[in-house]
Image (tube, rainbow, N blue to C red):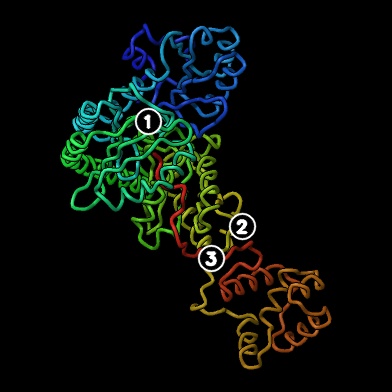
Amino acid sequence: MMRTADLIDALGGALLREIVSGAGEQISDVALGEPDEVPFGQPDNLILGVGTGDPDAAVVLLRWAADASAGAVVLKAPLAANPRVREAAEELRIGVIELQRQASWTHVVWLVRSVLDRAIGVTVAGDASVYSDLFSFADAAAAIVGAPVTIEDAHSRVLAYSAVQDVSDPARISTIIGRRIPEEVVTYFQARGVFRRLRRSSEPIWVDEGPGGVLPRLIIPVRAGGELLGSIWAVTPKPVPPDQVHELEQAASVLALHLLRLRAQTGAARRMSAERLRAALIASTDDADTESWLRAGPWRVVALSASAAGDDLHRQIDLWESIVRRYGWSQPLLTEVDGVPLTVVTAEGAERTVGSWPWLRAIVEEVYAHDSTVFAVAGGCAQVSGALPQSRAEAIELSRLARAGQLLGPTVELEAVWYDLIVERARAAVRMEAGFLGGPIPDLLAHDRSRGTGYVATLAAYLQHYGEPAQAARSLHIHPNTLRYRMSQMRAIADVDLTRPRVRLALQLQLIAVQGVQPDAPRLPPARRASRTPSPAGPSS
């Protein structure tokens, strides 16, 4: 992250000028604030007001940025200093930065992204030399073909890009800035077999121009030992001569070493982050120490599942990392405890606030439309980091209910199903191996087995609809007189006073333990295996 003042200083006062100082002082990423599209926003983003040309549109953009907890908004002069804009910014406590009128948005995009990426490279990897080498490599590759170049990893995430920007298109700008490109462009690349050929072949790929102003591209796969590590993308309006293609192919073998080194460093950083998070979820740690690397609370611990990834825990976590990164969470908090994939999100925020529970609910419900095996269940709200282990335990308990098909929908939070969890805990305490401790259930079970009657199911329906025999009979698809007859027969086998509330409660808990389900819980079929990986986790560039 960078302070807003430091970013302005790095780019020069002749280009940017602070008009309104906002509540947020840190910038972690940059995103386009287009008037016709409201993307998922990330806290501390620098929002570029591209296409915002009047005060009304600027005020709308400021409100959206404030809702997303953005760091600041960049507007062109003289709009940034407009009295209405300044007044709205001060009221919303969102920073406004003025971009000089003659400046190009495209150049600002490259400059800001370059400064932030290099700064983040030092923070994330711990060794800035790898990222510096990748940016230098992109510049060298651009010099070979005389065209802009991006270097991407095996998941189509941009790692570095060249300073040369003489030729560009909307897809390239969106890829570098928002880590997203229009769906029609992704569809175009998929239809041309680009991603399939990248996975299977080491041969250069040429893609003709496409919809939405997409320019032709030369793509060079980067491999080591047959494994795809990444790719080089060059945006060029005409085919590249064979000698230059060959030179890029040779350079790709050198790039493979850099990508292997980067993967090793980021893998180590990821493992350290997962272990640190795991430690905070298992045992209460010093609040100040934990909260120094967490976003401001309160938080929720969320248990995740996606049967498309099978039973392999590492594949589950990799899939969820791919999904949340696809929707803008650049540094997700993911780990596992007791074999359950977990994440920690902020409890509050809007649906477009990346890393919040409302945001995660929105993307899980979107992915659910493609894969009905996914779910995310959240434990209770932790006001201090010391309460994270309790939220973790609740999330894992809820995940067991979800896997058994006893919770409704792909996303659930504790407050909505607290009663299910209480009953589940009571059911677990009423262990059948410890004996029934009395009551009519053993005799009724024996009678059902020997005579083929349905007395246990009848008693369960009667208790569930106590005082409503007609409703109980309907749930069993029998006549009320049949229900009354069965109840009289049961009393002859094992008489019990059902007018006592505590007796009815004890019987219901015994029945839940016998049946293994909560009789009045809304249920979906248990999670099943999916035949394919959910498409939203696919390539993003």
Drawn side of residue 166 relative to residue 383, left or right: left
Drawn side of residue 262 relative to residue 32, left or right: left
Give the residue at x 49% y 40%: 184
Can residue 351 be seen in this snapshot? yes
Q: Which residue is mark 3?
A: 526
Most extreme residue toward the right, as rendered?
481
Q: Residues within 10 Å of mark 2 (few under 14, many from 20)?
A: few
Q: Earlier in the sequence, mark 3 or mark 2?
A: 2
Q: Which residue is mark 1?
A: 176
Q: Nearer the viewer, residue 485 or 206?
A: 206
**Amino acid residing under circle 2:** Tyr
Does the CB distance between marks 3 and 1 fall below 8 Å?
no
Does the CB distance between marks 2 and 1 fall below 8 Å?
no
Q: Earlier in the sequence, mark 2 or mark 1?
A: 1
Give how far across and how far down residue 519 sits, in percent.
64, 68
State the mark number for residue 419.
2
Give how far across and how far down residue 25 sits, in percent.
42, 19
**Amino acid residing under circle 3:** Pro
Q: Residues within 10 Å of mark 1 (few under 14, many from 20)?
A: many
Q: Nearer the viewer, mark 3 or mark 1?
A: 1
Q: Earlier in the sequence, mark 3 or mark 1?
A: 1
What secondary structure is marked by label 1? helix
Give the residue at x 53% y 57%: 372
Q: Nearer the viewer, mark 2 or mark 1?
A: 1
